[in-house]
Image (cartoon, rainbow, N blue to C red):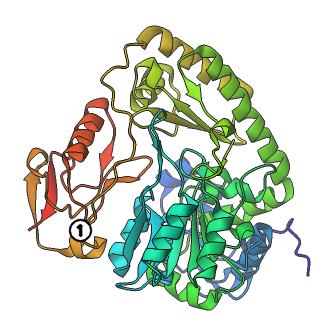
Amino acid sequence: MKLDQNRAPIKEALEELQNNRVVPFDVPGHKRGKGNPELTEFLGKRCMSLDVNSMRPLDNLCHPVSVIKEAEELAADAFGAGYAFFMVGGTTSAVQAMVLFAAKRGEKIILPRNVHRSVINAMVLSGAVPVYVNPAVDKRLGISLGMSVSDVEAAIRENPDAKAILVNNPTYYGICSDIKKITDLAHSHNMLMLADEAHGTHFYFGEDLPLSAMAAGADMAAVSMHKSGGSLTQSSFLLTGQNINPASVRQIINLTQTTSGSYLFMSSLDISRQNLAVKGKEIFRRVCSLAEYAREEINRIGDYYAYSREIINGDSIYDFDATKLSINTIDVGLAGIEVYDILRDDYDIQIEFGDMGNILAYISVGDRERDIERLVGALSEIRRRYKKDKSGMLISEYISPAVEMTPQEAFYAEKESVPLEDSEGRICSEFVMCYPPGIPILSPGERITNDIIRYIKYAKEKGCFLTGAEDMNTDRLNVTR
């Protein structure tokens, strides 16, 4: 049966609730904003009046039987999935649900090491064992790439008892692995295929974009609707394939997701799905056009390199997400994080992130040509004002880890705090990462090397925002005893 993608059931139910002028003797305590006039003035009456609790006409996120269930069915239809779950804890909660569903304590998951911390966090919770496929590195750009199919095959041969394979689709920089071939490999060895599609919502709705996880036949995909899909921050979807039992997945989700789902988040997912299902091709055609225009203009400046599909090699870079405006800054003599800071502090331009050698400007339907021109003009001026010799710069974004313990074992082990300089050779029991992008430099269970210490010091010197460690300044690290 063809579903009507012009519908938005949660939005419709909220509008009906407002029309009925129901008197609230339930939570939240601000009672449609009347109890907190300062917050209502700040956020607006409309927003506060829609911040309501689960009730019979609005259904229940933990056990949907009416409007939320209908909205989830519409989302599944739009994404070509067997089922779509509304996630109000961000894509972190969707990723955690995937990992918790796929592997129990002691069971293995094959995955690239350049995953978001949420994947490894989930392994801390579940006790699953990571089997890392170390990604190739583009030495010119200083970024980690996708998983080579041959490396995945080797990991399967060495770990035939693994329960699942997880792939980034795409990476933060726009790099895609051959998700169809890896999915076929997983299924031929009775393994689940999981996809972190935090940055791939548009793959489902645009044209001439990389293959989506559901189209590739994956079993589960975590999709950040709030990134390129237009919903509110912290709202995402967890998609499942036709062969996954949604009732079992719901039980896993309910282990960690709130019982007080925000109707602001859920309605934003509902309305954004409606918008993309109806207008997605047009929306992402324009986004691709804006990104391509930006790349052409930036590459005319000199020294910067805004890369795209020309870097595809058919394996570790099987495809590239052309909506991503990833720009290498090394030849300007500046780390990406330095360009990031200058753009914000001197030009009032906020980009997504900067690392040791790259910046990422997130292009979406909300951008305009004049915004792109302002960014291009600022980058040109930064080159003119700040260009310097690039010798002595660190460019590698990825350091292969030496894994000595599982994330769970290391995180809960007896530990001590030692100065960063004295930590070489010890086993880390916490995370260290630059955020964004949130890919760990160190994860629990990994041995600390001199290269890692040098990288952390360099990241601090360049102004990266380091997170994860108990010591807020990352001057000390927690290590196992």
Amino acid at pointer 1: Glu
Q: In front: 170, or 29?
A: 170
Mark 1 Cα shell of 10 Å, populated few (<14), some (14-19), many (≥20): some
402 lies above or below 130 = above
Instruction: Name the outermost residue toward the top.
Output: 384
Which residue is label 1 attached to? Answer: 404
Residue 409's image quarter? Answer: bottom left
> Would you say 4 lies left or right of 148 here?
right
Residue at left 72%, top 59%?
Answer: 211
> Would you say 135 lies left or right of 305 here?
left
Would you say residue 24 is visible in this rendering?
Answer: no
Residue 271's image quarter? Answer: bottom right
Position of residue 431 measured from the top left corner of the image (x, y, whole percent): 28, 58
Residue at left 26%, top 65%?
Answer: 444
Quadrant of the image containing the N terminus: bottom right
Q: In front: 279, or 70?
A: 279
Q: Total number of numbered labels?
A: 1
Position of residue 51 measured from the top left corner of the image (x, y, whole percent): 58, 66
Q: Secondary structure at mark 1?
A: loop
Quadrant of the image containing the C terminus: bottom left
Residue at left 86%, top 58%?
Answer: 278
Q: In front: 244, or 390?
A: 390
Position of residue 125 measured from the top left corner of the image (x, y, whole percent): 35, 77
